[in-house]
Amino acid sequence: MTLREVRDLLGAEVLSGDELLDTEVHAAFGSDLMSDVLAFVQDQGLLLTGLNSPQVIRTAEMMDMKCVVFIRGKAPASSILELAQDRGLVVMSTPLRMYQACGVLYSAGLSG
Amino acid sequence: MSGDDKIHLSYQVEGGDLTRAGEASSSVKQTLRKLGLDPAVIRRVSVCMYEGEINMVIHANGGLAMVDVGLDDIVITLTDFGPGIPDIDKAMQAGYTTAADSVRDLGFGAGMGLPNMKKYSDDMKIKSIVGMGTTVTMVINIP
Ligand SMILES: Nc1ncnc2c1ncn2[C@@H]1O[C@H](COP(=O)(O)OP(=O)(O)OP(=O)(O)O)[C@@H](O)[C@H]1O
Ligand SMILES: [Mg+2]
């Protein structure tokens, strides 16, 4: 699934990395706990989170993820977006809650 | 490769401010990418170093991070002058944490870091003296 499809499925707004929406992801991970992301992510390219902090971008970078989706309409600070831009990470914000956002993507074929 | 040919990276890691934690790990990751190392090796180094860097920031008020890149392995040495770890076996248990709620609000403090560092490294040693500080050494082999 491309990040463009992710954006459309989630009704999300792209906050950084508009030019990278053709990037493919095959699996996703949803968590507010970065400890869990570090311990359990393997090749999931997409991170859904309700945690609004620069550590989300750092953690995604460490795990070679391609895109971070902030749920519940969270608006990350410009410093967070700059960091993402610098690291070539796509950032989106969706109005959906965690369970809904994961459900929509899972039903559309994106595995966990 | 003799010791002198190794690439040596070192960073001062500031304590307290979790929002900046990870800058050293990020820099190491970019350097290893430029060197053209296997992405799987880079991932393992990234996880080990980042978990260790976060630990120094949240538990030990910062410290010194050193990374030696050789032909056969990468050695990460994290040294701090924090409170030390009284019971290392206990600290190594998954789920054991002394992190404050403020740390948990920032997405850390699940007691998973040390076990994860052990899992992703080929060798890990912790030396700690209460009241003096802690040194964590991790070796990641390059296949
Ligand atoms: N450098 C350190 N100095 C002092 N204590 C430490 C240090 N590193 C770890 N500890 C102690 O060991 C415990 C377990 O560490 P570990 O990294 O496994 O979990 P955590 O940091 O509490 O949570 P997480 O890593 O999931 O965010 C910590 O809560 C802390 O008490
Ligand atoms: Mg930790």
Image: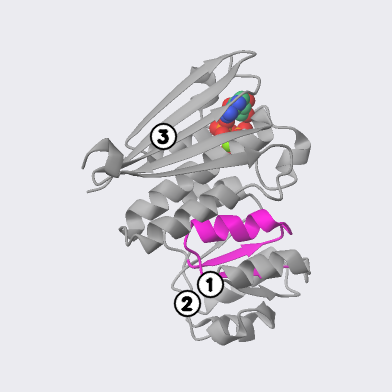
Q: Residue A26, position in %: x, y?
A: 43, 73
Residue positioned 65% across, 65% down in the render: A83
Q: Residue B11, position in %: x, y?
A: 55, 42
Res. B18 image quadrant: top right
C-alpha gap between disc 3 and disc 2: 34 Å
Residue positioned 64% across, 49% down in the render: A33
Residue A109 circle label = 2
Which segment is the magenta one?
Answer: A45-71
Q: Residue B28, position in %: x, y?
A: 47, 52
C-alpha gap between disc 2 and disc 1: 5 Å
Residue A94 in the figure: left or right of residue A63: right
**Which one is in front, A2 or B140?**
B140
The residue that disc 1 covers is A106
- Tell me: is circle 1 under 8 Å from ligand 1: no
At mark 3, the secondary structure is: helix
Identity, as a three-letter code, of the amino acid under mark 1: Tyr
Residue B110 appears in the figure: no
Crowding around mark 3 (Cα neighbors within 10 Å: few <14, some 14 to 19, many 20+) is: some
Q: Residue B75, position in %: x, y?
A: 37, 38
At mark 1, the secondary structure is: helix
